[in-house]
């Protein structure tokens, strides 16, 4: 692991960059959003100080932030949409900490080289990048396991041996008498109706007058019954 002073230095730079970002007018942050942005910064700082550091993904920030600050803490989707630049600052800081955590000595690089095909050797930079990737995979695996545990606790499993409950049957509604609907459809085809069907839909013409009655009430009722019988209501 890097020395604590190095971690604090990286976190300090991320904090300075974040404050500068909050002051930029184009970020669109102000008032309560500024306060919530600083909440995000606090949780991200907490993540980066852990051993090993925890990646500040939007879902993990939202999960931890709501525990500490309550329901006013931004949701994961909100962090993606409105605080993306801020999260990117802390993501880069996380990757930098993981990068400096990689052991650079030749002796520690040799076991990694031996897992490759014979004759293939890696330079120090490639070994470091592979170790960063390995650390990120471990971090993401931890996130997945943490989310699985939350789901396991929140959604109880069905009792063993018991068949799943049957789906409720949809109510069968009687079909309405459609003669009124057919009559209305035939009527709008006449030029004198004041309506015209074009390639977009039904529109009123000059013959319709200032306040035309587009559809009789009984036709509206029929359409509602038809819509409900199809499962939409």
Image (spheres, rainbow, N blue to C red):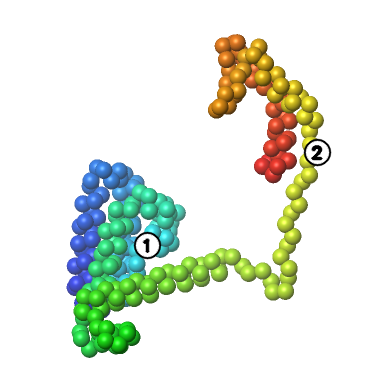
Height in image: 228 above or below 102?
above
Height in image: 208 above or below 229?
above
Give the quarter of the image for residue 14.
Answer: bottom left
Residue on which the image places disc 2: 174
Give residue 177's mark.
none
From the viewer's perspective, is 112 left or right of 205? left
| Residue 177 visible in rendering | yes
The quadrant in which the C terminus is found is top right
* Labels 2, 1: front one: 2
Where residue 152 appears, x then y in whole percent? Answer: 55, 69
Residue on which the image places disc 1: 57
Image point (23%, 47%), residue name: 23
Between 121 and 46, which is closer to the camera in this rendering?
A: 121
Image point (28%, 46%), residue name: 27
Q: Residues within 10 Å of mark 2 (few under 14, many from 20)?
A: few
From the viewer's perspective, is 78 left or right of 148? left
| Residue 4 visible in rendering | no
Image point (23%, 46%), residue name: 24
């Amino acid at each position: 692991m890097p020395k604590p002073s190095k971690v604090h230095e990286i976190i300090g730079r991320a904090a300075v960059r974040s404050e500068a970002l909050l002051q930029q007018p184009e970020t669109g942050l102000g008032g309560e959003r500024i306060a919530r942005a600083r909440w995000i910064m606090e949780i991200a700082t907490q993540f980066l100080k852990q051993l090993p550091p925890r990646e500040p993904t939007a879902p993990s920030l939202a999960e931890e932030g709501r525990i500490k600050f309550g329901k006013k803490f931004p949701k994961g989707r909100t962090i993606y949409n409105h605080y993306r630049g801020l999260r990117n600052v802390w993501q880069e800081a996380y990757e930098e900490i993981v990068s400096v955590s990689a052991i650079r000595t030749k002796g520690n690089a040799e076991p990694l080289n031996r897992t490759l095909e014979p004759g293939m050797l890696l330079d120090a930079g490639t070994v470091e990048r592979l170790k960063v990737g390995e650390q990120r995979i471990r971090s993401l695996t931890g996130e997945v396991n943490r989310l699985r545990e939350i789901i396991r606790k929140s959604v109880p499993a069905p009792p063993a041996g018991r068949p799943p409950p049957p789906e409720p049957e949809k109510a069968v509604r009687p079909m309405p008498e459609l003669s009124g609907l057919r009559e209305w459809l035939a009527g709008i085809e006449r030029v004198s109706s004041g309506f015209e069907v074009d390639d977009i839909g039904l529109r009123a013409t000059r013959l319709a007058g200032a306040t035309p009655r587009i559809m009789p009430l009984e036709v509206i009722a029929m359409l509602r019954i038809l819509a409900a019988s199809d499962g939409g209501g």
